[in-house]
Image (spheres, rainbow, N blue to C red):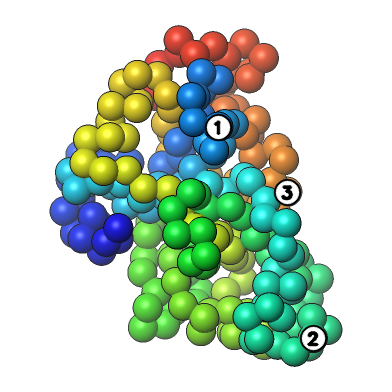
Amino acid sequence: MDFENIRNRSDEASSLEGHFLIAMPGMEDERFSRSVVYICAHSSSGAMGFIVNKAQPLSFAALLTQLEIVSDPNEIRLPQKGREVPVCQGGPVEQGRGFVLHSEDYDSESTVSVDDGIALTPTLDILKAISSGVGPSTAIMVLGYAGWSPGQLESEIAANGWLTCRADLDIVFDAELENKYTRALAILGINPAFLTSEAGHA
């Protein structure tokens, strides 16, 4: 999926860029059950986003070691908060490909601004920067992404597969993944205990 092609065709009036998709209880695809997806590109060409509340079994320090960015996790020169950069299952597409969603205080040739306060960098350079303590102040690593063909996401929303709302970056970047689904629903004033598959979207 061509991230830039989707974004370049974005219609701001209807685009969900910078929004959350929150899975409804009736979500038929188990890969997206109780998921919170941050949409980073959406236009008539399709949509692309990242699940931000489902953990990978691999820690960030272990990932840096596996990619041979550092030879030992103890070489990562970061405060404890930096060592706890969450690594998420970003989606079912290209699960071996990594992306970093991060605060806008880091920039490289491959960095793309997604929305106010958040950017995306898909290269190893940012991992090297983080490992040496000169990366962004806030970041979340995702492996893989979620993609929708033209009109597919709109159809899923119309069929009550998803709720939508403006994204909260505190939720996106929070290392505590377990409560993100409930917190995202709370933006809409919804208690998950009372949520049914027949609800609409905001």
What label does residue 54 carry, if any? none
Callout 3 secondary element: loop
Identify the image quadrant of residue 82.
Answer: bottom right
Relative vertical location of residue 30 with respect to residue 1 in this rendering, above or below: above
Q: Amino acid under label 3?
A: Glu
Q: Which residue is mark 1?
A: 30
Mark 1 or 3: the one toward you = 1
Image coords of residue 116 (percent x, y): 40, 57
Q: Which residue is mark 3?
A: 176
Q: Nearer the viewer, residue 79 or 161?
A: 161
**Going by the image, does 110 lie left or right of 92?**
left
Mark 2 or 1: the one toward you = 1
Check disc 1: other Cα within 10 Å, few if <14, some if 14-19, many if 20+: few
Q: Earlier in the sequence, mark 1 or mark 3?
A: 1
Asked whether the residues under the numbered discs 2 and 3 touch, taking CB atoms below 8 Å apart as contact, a structural biologist would say no
Q: Residue at x 45, y 59 (%)?
A: 94
Q: Residue at x 31, y 21 (%)?
A: 158
Measured in 3D between alpha carbons, the distance from the residue under mark 1 to the one under mark 3, in whole angstroms, is 22 Å
Q: Earlier in the sequence, mark 2 or mark 1?
A: 1
Check disc 2: other Cα within 10 Å, few if <14, some if 14-19, many if 20+: few
Q: Amino acid under label 2?
A: Asp
Q: Which residue is mark 2?
A: 72
Q: Nearer the viewer, residue 28 or 180?
A: 28
Mark 2 or 3: the one toward you = 2
Relative vertical location of residue 192 with respect to residue 52 in this rendering, above or below: above
**Going by the image, does 127 lie left or right of 1?**
right
